[in-house]
Image (tube, coloured by chain):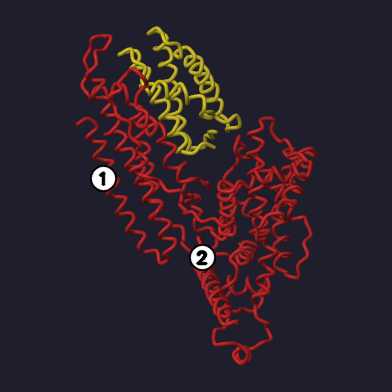
Amino acid sequence: MPLDALIAHIDSLIKESHESERELEKIPFSSIRLNLQKAIASHRNGLKIIRNGLTESLMKKAEIIASLPSKSGKSYSVEQVMYTFFPEIISASYITAERLNTDITMLAKTGIVPELYYWLLEIPENFSFKKSAVLREGERFLTETFNQRIIAPLQTLIDLAKKPDVDGSLAQVGPIDLTKTNPVEEGYIVSCVRGEAQSPIMWPILCHEMFELVDMEQGILKNFKEFVSTQSKELPVFDPDSQTNERWILEILMDFLAMTSFGPMYARSLLEYCKRSPYYPTPQYPEMCSRLYCAYLYLLESFRTDSDIFHRCQKKAREDVEQEIQRYETNEDLDTEKKTKLGFLCSLMEQFCRSIKILTFLDRLEKHVGESENSKTTLKEILKNEDLFLPFKDPVMTFGDINNNVLLHHISLAIDPNILLNVVIANYDSYQKEAHLKIIIDSIKKWKVKQAWNSSVDNLLHARTP
Amino acid sequence: MATFSETEGWFSILGAGMAGLRLLKEFGIRTAELEYFIQNFDKTEMKISAFAPSPLIDQYETLFNQAKERLKEGIEQIKEPKVTDKTVDNVLKDAKELYNLLGEVHRTIASGLVLA
């Protein structure tokens, strides 16, 4: 049979995908495991679409073409038709099959710790997001839908199978809907640069990706544009091409939301990313100086909070970013006109942020204080006054407390990972992967357990209240 | 920056176009592949970023844009019901050139060329 070798190979990849899926059994968290299973099943269906597209559509067409008289009088076997007329389609199918296979492996044998899901998915969940979202190691930070990653590259094969011929020619080939038997779920894949999956300093960039996911699902940029027009204002123009301009504003907006949600040290992560990967603007991504300058403006703002965590992180991030901003100014990458436009954009984004339900870093700090016990109250006193179902409470932590516990004494803390990571990144000179990565991951786990426990206590108290 | 999946999609559209052109020339039939190519080629945002780092941009951008423009013009010509073999050959040559350039670029992505 023509394409024997390729079809046998794709079959072996489909089989291997089941073996990869078994790797997921090692993940102890069922909801994360389920999301990854769905993602792998969708990728496997992508492989099946390729297989069926080739065997049930393209090959059938080749059989008919082989029976037609050619203008040159030359006759073709089915195999000759496949390799003479369709070699690029076959080659593209092979390339995509191999990439889907790599994707499956990256999902199954990942260096991304599952605890990160608990921290990161809080962002889309706050926007009532219900679909599957998975993290994978990749070549860059990127958010894509399952459809973009799996179906889009196969669209030509799918469309040609659905409408195999034009009127009056080759009408014998029956149409097939390749996606009907091999459906691909709706969901999102967030890629993290492979080498950075275990670098806490780069994790905040994933918050940016989480907001991109929400934007793709609910149109944050669209809402922002509407908000700007209701203010009778217009978005600043950084590039004459309106599509490019919009994409650049989207990137800056996602940074702004990530920084508002994660906290001041997001700016340091952005700077680190820019230093590690010399960054060139493209129609999709604005100059790094624009992104960093907006982050810098946030660091210059004064916010009212009693917590020393915010002020110390803000000061540290400002010191870190300031030098880079000065360099941009010296090199004339940042001129007065650009700074004015960016300042205007930031003021719009700030007003917009107040109009959407986003848990800010200041909200998190307030929540941390609200949920913490009065440090003067002893466990004995709590036991006297409370029910047997005690809420899980920690004392209020200062910047120094978190730094000492985590980085100095290697004690994991059940506090909001955004707060913890801000302090860790602010003291990143003391961070050592071997000593601290596990402590940070354990902290996220403890925080999640604390949340689940306190929510159970709340539910019990609610149920008992007449 | 173009993703691998986007680039794969472009390969498929160009591949369908080349298949359609060859079938038109050899059998005189206008197949779904050709119509698909005519309808979808211009919808792709296939271009090398104007901001890609040199020297790669100098190496590829002009060639890429020229090949794309020639192909667009060729597509206009093959929309006509009657086309000569020579026209088909020329369009096929331009499609192949763009496909090969895209293949080269695809292999170079990892070494820093920025696609958009």
- Residue tagged 1: A12
- Please say if A257 is above or below B34: below
Please give the name of the residue rendered at 69% of the width and 86% of the height, measured from the top-left corner.
Answer: A376
User: SS for tag 2?
Assistant: helix
Image colour for chain B is yellow
Image-based side of A313 in relation to A139, left or right: right
- How much space separates mark 2 and mark 1, taking CA atoms? 37 Å
Numbered mark located on residue A94 in the image: none
Q: Total label count?
A: 2
Locate the C terminus of chain A and report the quarter of the image it occupies: bottom right
Q: What colour has chain A?
A: red
Relative height, residue B33 to residue A100 (above, below): above
Measured as percent of width and height from the top left, residue A158 is found at: 38, 34
| Residue that mark 2 sits on | A437
Residue B58: percent from left, percent from top? 56, 25
Task: Examine the rendering and report whether any part of residue B107 can be seen.
Answer: no
**Which residue type does callout 2 highlight?**
Leu
Q: Nearer the viewer, mark 2 or mark 1?
A: 1
Q: Is residue B28 left or right of residue A356?
A: left
B53 sits to left or right of A168: right
Instruction: Using the rendered image of the protein, determine whether residue A350 is visible from the camera's viewpoint.
Output: yes
